[in-house]
Amino acid sequence: MAGTLLEKVEQHTRLAGHNRVAMLLFRLGDEQLFGINVFKVREVLRRPPMERLHGVHELIAGSCDYRGQTIPVIDLAAALGYAPLREVESAHLMVTEFNRSVQGFLVADLQRMVHCAGDAMAAPASALGFGSRVNAVTRVDGALLAVVDVEHVLASIDAPPAELSAGLQREASHRSLASRRVMVVDDSGIARRRLVNLFKQLGTDCVVAKDGREALERLLELAAGDSAQAIELVVSDIEMPRLDGYALTRAIREAPTLRRIKVLLHSSLSGMFNEGMVKEVKADRFVAKFHPDQLAQAVMELLPEPVAAPQAATG
């Protein structure tokens, strides 16, 4: 079943960049459907033998050998409030790659892959009870699908650094960044907070949007107003409900009042496919989440020092 599922991934690549995404569906212990972007999934396996680890986070079920590499195995069911799967022989292992790391997630029951339209996805209402580890919901054949924020789960176990290195802080202090305006676009609250903190360290004014649709509406509004409020750089996630980062970049490039804006795509997605899509939608840069120094360096390169106007000659 795993091979059949993953052999189909290439058939879904043409959907990316058009506000559509292919989701791998699974369950964690009841009838509720969950999903993950197939481009984060390397392989799906039956639960392998695992070594128990002492002194690690409670969500780490152990470690296993994956093609000669030792990877951590995270109990995704336990992370979402279900009964742990670490001792369940019928569980499956989703081997994933994102944020430049490889890890496995235990799930109870694999389903199939489906296409989801970005504009049909929405942030989950708090009354649904999913908490911050689900970042979007939609309907598949009438059933509720919850898209798991696996980056949030991983960050709760091993949080990435939040501060710039001393060297980059010194470099930023010598740059004229205080007058520049940047827009941050991300559907993850934890990602938005990290990015806002980063731009505070750079001394840069920051406007925040929760998805691509909100970002595009705000950009058009600002472009029609005071030029002093104009955005020079958009730092956007790729996976978002309503309008994803690829579609947002396309829209910026097609709008006469916006096309001068620099676009940096900042995502946990990685690999040759993503690099190709970044070029296709004409983004200016891609930086994988979340490496503060790398992101800050890219921002400073995309916001060069303004050229001083020549002084008039005096008589």
Image (spheres, helix red, strand yellow):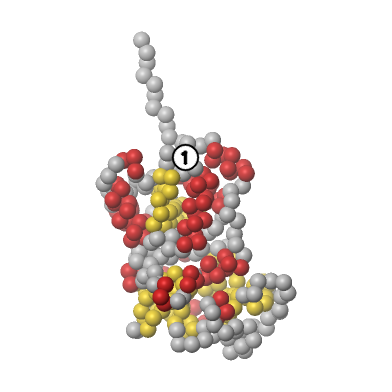
Residue 169 lies in quadrant? top right
Dot 1 surroundings within 10 Å: few (below 14), some, or many (20 or more)? some
Q: Which residue is at the front of the view, 266 or 42? A: 266
Q: Position of residue 114 (x, y in %)?
A: 40, 79
Q: Which residue is at the front of the view, 248 or 185? A: 185
**Callout 1: SS:** loop
Residue with the most extreme right position? 54
Q: Which residue is at the front of the view, 161 or 48? A: 161
Residue at (48, 69) in percent of width and height: 132
Q: Residue under circle 1?
A: 177
Left or right of residue 122, residue 270 in this image: right
Q: Position of residue 122 (x, y in %)?
A: 36, 70
Q: Which residue is at the front of the view, 275 or 62? A: 62
Residue at (73, 74) in percent of width and height: 54
Residue at (43, 63) in percent of width and height: 187
Q: Is residue 71 above or below residue 83?
A: above
Q: Is residue 306 visible?
A: yes
Q: Is residue 247 visible?
A: no
Q: Is residue 263 above or below residue 243?
A: above
- Which quadrant holds the C terminus? top left
Residue at (51, 44) in percent of width and height: 202
Residue with the most extreme front position? 127
Residue 103 lies in quadrant? bottom right
Q: Label 1 amino acid?
A: Leu
Q: Position of residue 74 (x, y in %)?
A: 60, 75
Q: Is residue 174 above or below residue 81?
A: above
